[in-house]
Amino acid sequence: MSQFVKELISKMTFTEKIGQMTQLSGDFFASDNSAITGPLQQANLATTDLYQVGSILGVSGVDEVKKIQENYLQHSRLKIPLLFMADVVHGYRTIFPIPLALAASFDPQLVSQTSEIFSREAAAGGVHVTFAPMVDLVRDPRWGRVMEANGEDPFLNSELAKASVEGIQGQQKIPDADHVAACVKHFAGYGAVEAGREYNTVDISEWRLRDQYLSGYQAAIEAGVPLVMTAFNTFQGKPATGNYHLMRDILRRELGFKGPLISDWDAIGEMIAHGTASDLQDAAQQALKAGVDIDMMSMAYLKLARRVHPSSELVDLVNQAVERILNFKESLGLFTDPNRGLHSENEKQIFSTHNLEIAQQAAVESTVLLKNKNNLLPLSKDCRLGLVGKFADNPDLLGSWSWQGKMAETQTIKSALQENFTKVSYIQNQQLQAVDLQLLKQQDVIVACLGLSAQQSGEATSMTHPQIPDQQLALLRKLQQLNKPIITVLITGRPLVLNPIIKNSDGLLLLWFPGSRGAAALAQILLGEKEPGGRLPMTFPKDLGQIPLYYNNFRTGRPLVGDKSDLENKYLSKYIDQENQPAFCFGYGLGYAKTALSESKLDKKTYQSIDSIKVSVKIENHSDISAKQVIQVYCHQIVGETVRPQWELKAFQKVKLQPKEIRKVEIDLPLNRLAYVHSDLKRRLDPGNYCLRVGFDSQSGLRQSFKII
Ligand code: GLC
């Protein structure tokens, strides 16, 4: 703690300290009187309370931020500047593909680059902290927030968590005035909500939390994330936000997090609804003891300010919290410049051509080609296209949490295709009357743009049936009658059950919510100017009943062996009405070029635990076009102290090859990545025998074995 912060704290009243620990939304600071009669009155707050709160969420824009900050400081006795926080998750005004789509790029450098761009735009817009990255491990597409996550694999999640934090902070421990600070969320385990139902119970063992769910948060903390946000869910029967063990023991003591911990929206107050707090004071006490420094929107901490004689323990806890908050404000330079150098000049970079070009590249690298029957794709410029479907002429391509992104500024697929193809016939009517079918009969290829709207993914959008709506399936069945090649373009923020789509499509492109320049990226991909670079970060199930279905599952005592005996033997871990196989597995994705791997080798057969494995493999581009691939390295521990996943991704490398290029690729795999949490809850690496497999997805590849002594 600096001398400045020390002296400041010594001047603060108990009420002012509690104020610093309270965060209110922007509507409380509305310049007209609506705040007085609206939120302040509902929250039973006086305007004096307002000028003591420490931070505000959901406000951006130079003028607005400056006006609020100026007015606030005029009323603040000790002139402690407000902290402005916002949900800039995958773009500020230039919107990038949703995080789950960016995870499909398997490109940490790209994730870092897009994160830095949105961080710069947000900082230019007056934001100080963004509530990102979200690194909840996700394995259930019924949960709408999978769109914000990095997918089902702990290693990919940790690599991208690190890349996001480094990008947001501009590769700096403390972000300069051109970047915002990151806030990793939601600690911890929110992605494991039972039945994929939003805000539902999470009941996973501490062993599983530590072994698979903590990796993203840990990577973010190791990358220097300055803030952490608590999760809405319970862990071991206690709401995370009041969970001493989770926050004090695991987050602060073990993971070494020392910065401000902020609750999620009203998560402190929700302890009453959870039934573990009798009132707001009780909830506040529990959260404070758990080490939560900032109360987002429940006003629970403000209740503590009413205490006439707070106990010495309470005063102590409050002082620790305020110290973390003021240290953080000082680290951002807010005391010297409350506007962190904000000036309209900075705003010029927002939505710049350069940023939009990167957004388009990111959409190309995130798009996953799931099917390409008879190499239908790519298409020629003069190919006669029949364009149909809900998303054919629809700017709803940004996805949720797209902060200042504007649909009015988002090019539609129809517009992008008309710019790049000479003959595009767009049928607006999704019911396809006879006249429409007649017109479509004259086309060479049908492009059907189907999927779910942005409102159907993100927070509070759990679905019991994550699949394409019947009306869109009916359209596809009608198109089938035309006997024309059909390319289905999928707009979605979550894996879907796609069986009818897969059957009725010759080409299937997963565009996700591709952001501001997703339509232009699609045009480049359809033309073959760019090759889709995505590989699935989450399994696509064949059947709803398989969910949750993820590749890195444990073997069980009766695993399938992968041959016809699986059909003959009844007593195996399987269903009687469906295969275990997904529709598309983790890591899967096609390219336009034909590539192959061969000659995989390890530099040794036996390793010490401190070693890295050098995996070498030959990759060949058999095509006369350039190629991109994601070489994936999976490992399996033959015998563990606890059960071990059948395969786990432990390294990957995205490569781009020239036409006909043959290249030997070497991938380093530090063996400490194979450490796992034992039954004593300690992470260790075991000596023993291991398998390693190098491939283009999680289901096939070239096998090697090695030993750790
Ligand atoms: C929401 C979300 C959280 C977000 C916060 C502020 O409820 O759970 O991810 O950052 O509130 O908007």
Image (cartoon, grey):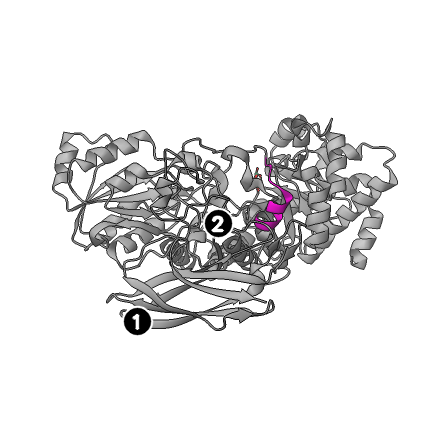
Q: Is residue 430 left or right of residue 264?
A: left
Q: Residue 176 appears at what percent x and percent y?
A: 61, 60
Q: Residue 114 appears at what percent x and percent y?
A: 47, 56
Q: Residue 555 magenta-drawn? A: no
Task: State which region is magenta.
Answer: 202-212
Local crowd size for mark 2, using a 10 Å CA cut-off: few (<14), some (14–19), many (≥20)? some
The residue drawn where x is 78% and y is 43% is 17
* Residue 258 in sight: no
Residue type at mark 1?
Glu
**Residue denoted by label 2:** 552
Q: Is residue 150 left or right of residue 654?
A: right
SS under mark 1: loop
Q: Residue 684: which quarter of the image?
A: bottom right
Q: Is residue 452 left or right of residue 119?
A: left
Q: Is residue 366 above or below residue 577?
A: below
Q: Residue 232 appears at what percent x and percent y?
A: 61, 37
Q: Is residue 428 left or right of residue 154?
A: left
Q: Is residue 260 above or below residue 623?
A: above
* Quadrant in which ligand 1 is drawn: top right
**Residue denoted by label 1:** 661
Local crowd size for mark 1, using a 10 Å CA cut-off: few (<14), some (14–19), many (≥20)? some
Q: Residue 210 appears at what percent x and percent y?
A: 62, 49
The residue drawn where x is 45% and y is 52% is 103
For this rendering, which residue is in front, 685 or 95?
685
Compute the Cα span from label 1 to label 2: 32 Å
Image quadrant in which the C terminus is located: bottom right
Q: Residue 301: which quarter of the image?
A: top right
SS under mark 2: loop
Image quadrant in which the N terminus is located: bottom right
